[in-house]
Image (cartoon, helix red, strand yellow):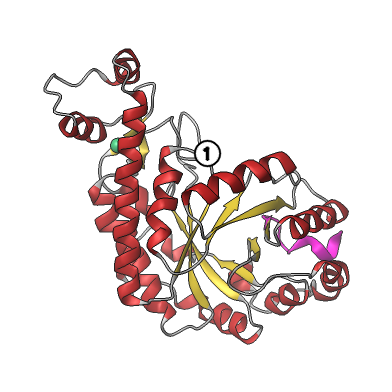
Amino acid sequence: MRLPGLRIGAVVLLLTACAQAGERCALVWTRGVNEHPEWCEAFQKAGFDSLTVKLPPTARDTLWWTNPSSLDSTNALLAEAHRTNLRGYFQIPLGMMTGTKFGPRTMTAAGFTESLLACPLNEEFWEKYLIPTLSFVARKSLDHPALKGVILDTEQYYGKERSGAINEHYCFCDACFSEFFKSRGIREALPTPAARQPWLESNDLLAAYWQHLEDRTREHFQRLAKSIQEIAPDFEIHFYIFEDTWFYRGLLKGLSVTKHPVFVFDGKTYNGFLKGWSKEAKSALARLNHRAVWVPGFYTATLNLRALRINIRKALEDGGSYWVYNEEEPFPFAEF
Ligand SMILES: [Zn+2]
């Protein structure tokens, strides 16, 4: 396959005011990267300092985090990333693939049970999936210097009512709701699923419910971060999508126990940099985790190379971090 390198290099090198490593991020998230370690050099020349490493196909339907060889097919990419001085991050999905099969299902505000999505707070989801998964990748990082951490992909792709961020659309499941009742000493029977949000509203308890879910989320992420630090003290945990909702507030507060900046990979900017949203997002992040770094993302399906260049320049002027999301193969920069 033709290397995209020279063309990207010529175009994007203009933009490289970049990134003191570790505090800022210029990441490429692209399909096909596992099969093409040779792309690393072109990415690096184009000004990127990081890339996502995709879970291999064999890891999609099995308990891959229990199998020491399940990530072996990514070794060549990690080796090349190391040689070209790129940081590698595994994408860990919270809303698709095997991990979503653990524990009680999540329930939406309408009282609909999402059969393919786990309740994001249930103990089984954390104990059998999230903590073992990150522990597994953290142990692998000890043998692969380019493997710096994970990006939690929080998009709820398998939702039947909707996909997207974990927001006030969730979670009204029996477990979440009964724990809330217990925490407040409420002894009455649980309302029927569709009546739960109206019940909270009519009892003036909706804000208290979101606070309760946020607190549980913060506790889960603190526990996760601490257990990962015991395996690999410098291992990084970042995430994709941000909305100022109970889940992301709890996530950012929980990750404040880590020693690294927390990169927040935003997708609201896929069609172009948004100055107003940049201010809003950065001010929310500053309130929730003083080391959080807002990273606007640009999507190659909606931005041509010229538009991409303009938007990356805006991101560099605004804070210095950006990421590019690409689903096309081969990596399309050479084609523009
Ligand atoms: Zn729940």
Question: How many discs appear?
Answer: 1
Residue 30 visible somewhere in the drawing: yes
Residue 238 lies in the magenta-colored region: no
Assign ligand 1 to one image quadrant. top left
Name which quarter of the figure residue 329 lies in: bottom right
What segment is highlighted magenta in the picture? 325-336
Residue 205: give x, y in percent of width and height: 31, 22
Q: Which residue is mark 1?
A: 164
Callout 1 secondary element: loop
The residue depicted at 45 percent of the width and 32 percent of the height is 160
Q: Out of 55 and 107, give the one closest to the viewer.
A: 107
Who is closer to the viewer here, 302 or 263?
263
Amino acid beneath label 1 = Gly
Query: Could you tell me which residue is drawn at 52 percent across and 64 percent down?
Result: 261
Q: Position of residue 71 (x, y in %)?
A: 44, 73
Residue nearest the observer in this picture, 93 or 66: 93
Determine whether, in the image, residue 61 is placed left or right of residue 25: left
Indicate the position of residue 155 as horizontal and vertical percent values: 50, 45
Crowding around mark 1 (Cα neighbors within 10 Å: few <14, some 14 to 19, many 20+) is some
Query: Extreme left residue here?
Result: 187
Q: Is residue 99 above or below residue 233?
A: above
- The answer, for residue 241, to whether it is visible in the render is no
- Left or right of residue 36, residue 72 in this image: left
Q: Residue 18, located in which quarter of the rendered image?
A: bottom right
Identify which residue is drawn at 81% across, 58% down.
313
Vertical placement of residue 128 versus 104, above or below: below
Vertical arrangement, residue 282 with respect to residue 72, above or below? above
Q: Position of residue 258 (x, y in %)?
A: 41, 65
